[in-house]
Image: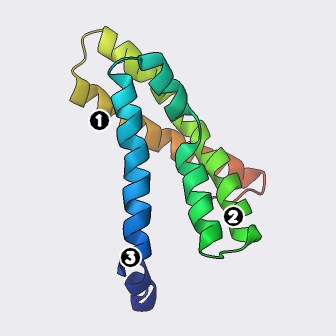
């Protein structure tokens, strides 16, 4: 990553502060809902809230429809390799795995599924990386 690009990434503006607070508030609210209704919090998290918020910020920053479209399409493909985790993690937890070891194993599995998805899609002309 060149120095100019790195400076852009690390530059923190007041607008970034607002984005940080609003985005964090969404996560905090959903985790608070989980305290009394785990099904509703799961539904809210399953919604593409993070992607929708990110695309709204992209629009506010005038990044253009092509970049937003690329983001939405990339998100679709990147979600696929994460889906097995939502079945494997509960299975591991219910079969005696500790939370952190199950989470670590699922991170490794998801990374493997991610790269497998990249390789398979590349054969069909879709380049994620």
Q: Residue at x 59, y 47 (%)?
A: 78
Estimate the spatial distance between the alpha carbons at disc 3 and disc 1, rounded to whole Å.
35 Å
Estimate the spatial distance between the alpha carbons at disc 2 and disc 3, rounded to whole Å.
22 Å
Report if the CB atoms under discs 2 and 3 are less than 8 Å apart.
no
* Between marks 3 and 1 in the image, the one whose residue lies nearer the viewer: 3
Give the SS element for disc 1: helix
Q: Name the residue under label 1.
A: 104
The C terminus - image quarter: bottom right
Query: Could you tell whether 71 is left or right of 16 in the image?
Result: right
Q: In terms of image quadrants, where is residue 38?
A: top left
Give the label on residue 14, or none: 3
Q: Which residue is drawn at 56% across and 54% down?
A: 53
Give the label on residue 68, or none: 2
Circle 3 residues within 10 Å: few <14, some 14–19, many ≥20:
few
Q: Find residue 94 and report its horizontal and vertical position in percent.
A: 32, 9
Circle 2 residues within 10 Å: few <14, some 14–19, many ≥20:
some
Q: Find residue 1 and report its horizontal and vertical position in percent.
A: 43, 81
Which callout, 2 or 3, points at the residue further toward the start of the chain? 3
Q: Which residue is drawn at 37% across and 58% down?
A: 21
Q: How is the image coloured?
A: rainbow
Which callout, 1 or 2, points at the residue further toward the start of the chain? 2
Give the SS element for disc 2: helix
* Between marks 2 and 3 in the image, the one whose residue lies nearer the viewer: 3
């Amino acid at each position: 990553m060149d120095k100019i690009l790195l400076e852009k990434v690390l530059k923190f503006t007041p607008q970034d502060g607002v984005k940080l607070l609003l985005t964090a508030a969404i996560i905090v609210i959903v985790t608070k809902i989980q305290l009394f209704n785990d099904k509703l919090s799961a539904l809210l998290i399953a919604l593409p809230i993070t992607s929708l918020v990110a695309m709204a910020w992209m629009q506010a920053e005038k990044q253009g429809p092509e970049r937003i479209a690329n983001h939405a399409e990339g998100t679709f493909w990147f979600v696929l390799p994460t889906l097995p985790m939502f079945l494997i993690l509960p299975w591991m937890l219910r079969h005696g795995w500790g939370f952190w070891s199950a989470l670590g194993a699922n991170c490794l599995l998801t990374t493997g599924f991610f790269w497998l998805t990249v390789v398979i899609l590349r054969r069909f002309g879709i380049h994620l990386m």
